[in-house]
Amino acid sequence: MSRRFFFSRLLAPRRQAHGDTNTKTLANPPSWLYRIVRFFIVVALMLSALWLLLALWYQFGTFSPITWLASVFIVGLLASITMLEYAPTLANKIINKTLRTKKLSKFLAMLYSGLWLVGVGWYFSIEAKSDRDWQPEVSEVLSYTRDANNPNLITFYKVRNFDWYLAEKETDGAAEILANERWETRTVDMSKLSGIDVTNSYWMGPLIAHTLVSFRFEDDRPLAFSFEIRKEDDESFSAFAGFFRRFELSLIASEERDIIYTRSNARGEQVYLFPISHLQKHEVKALFESYLKAADELV
C-alpha cells in the first residue's frame, strides 16, 4: 500500500464488499497500522478538546455563558466530525443526502483546527492581573532597591512578618487561622551571606511539598523566599486550576518566624529543614541574585 493511498483512506468510511450491499464483510480489511493511526487521531481530537474546555472552565468559571456556549459548540463540532467519519450511514439519514459527507467532514475538521489554534493563541496570551482583591498573605508585591554606593546592600520593600494564631469561629466554634498583618522594609548585605537552608513543607501526604529557601547572614537573621500563588479572597487552592493558568504567581520575602511558623504550627504541616553547607560564597550570592531577578520579572 503506497503512502498516498494509505492517507487517502485514513479518514474515509469503510466500504462494503462488491456484490452484496447487505454483507458486513469488508473487501479490503484495514491493516493494523491503519487502525492504530486512526485510533490515535481520535485520541488526539478528544484530548485537544478536553484541554481547551478545561482552560475555558478554569478561566471563565463553570457558570459563565462563554464557557457553556463554547462547550456546546466544540462538543457538537466533534460529534459531527465523528459521525461523518465513523458512521456515514447514520449521517446520511440525518442530513440531506445531496450533501457530500466527505467534503462536509473536511470542512468541519478545518473549522475545529482553526478554532483550536485560536484557543491556543488566547491561552498563551493570558496576562497576570494585579488589580484584584487578594488574600492578605499575598496582597503585596515584593520590590527592592540597590544602594548606589554599595551594590551589595539590598533594601527590600513589603517583607512579610505576620503573627499567625488560631481562633475559634463565632458561628460554629471551628478553628480558623488568623494573622496580625505586618509588612516591613528590610536591608541586607549580600557580602555577608553565609549559607542557605532549604525547607520542605509537606501539606498533602508524603509526595507533595512546598519548598522555601532561606538565606543566612553573618550578622543578621535569615531571610526566606517562597514562590506562592496569589489567591483572591473567594479562591481556594486547586492543582488543576494551576495547570490552566488560573492563578497569578508571586514571590514572597518573609521572616522565618512568619512563613515557616504558619506551616509548622498554624496549619500543622510536616516541615523539614535542610541546611546546605557545601556551597561556596559566590554560589550562594548567585542564587540570591536569581531571586532578585525573579522579583523584577514579577513586578
Image: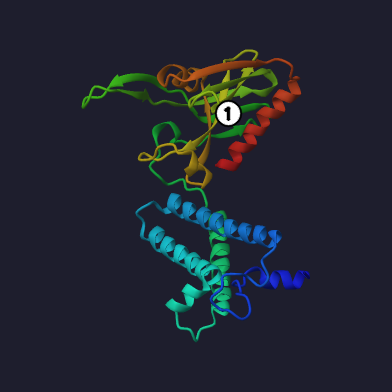
* Residue in the foreground of this view, choosing between 263 and 67: 67
Indicate left or right for 148 with 181 as reference: right
Q: Nearer the viewer, residue 183 or 34?
A: 34
Q: Quadrant of residue 40?
A: bottom right
x 34%, y 19%: residue: 166
The C terminus, quarter of image:
top right
Q: Position of residue 289 (x, y in %)?
A: 67, 31
| Residue at figure coordinates x 43%, y 19% from the top left | 268
Instruction: Identify the residue position indicated by label 1 in the image.
Output: 155
Farthest residue toward the right? 2
Q: Secondary structure at mark 1?
A: strand
Between 132 and 69, the one lying in front of the other is 69
- Residue sitting at x 51%, y 21%: 255
Q: Amino acid at mark 1?
A: Thr
Percent x, y for residue 10? 66, 68
Furthest residue to the left? 171
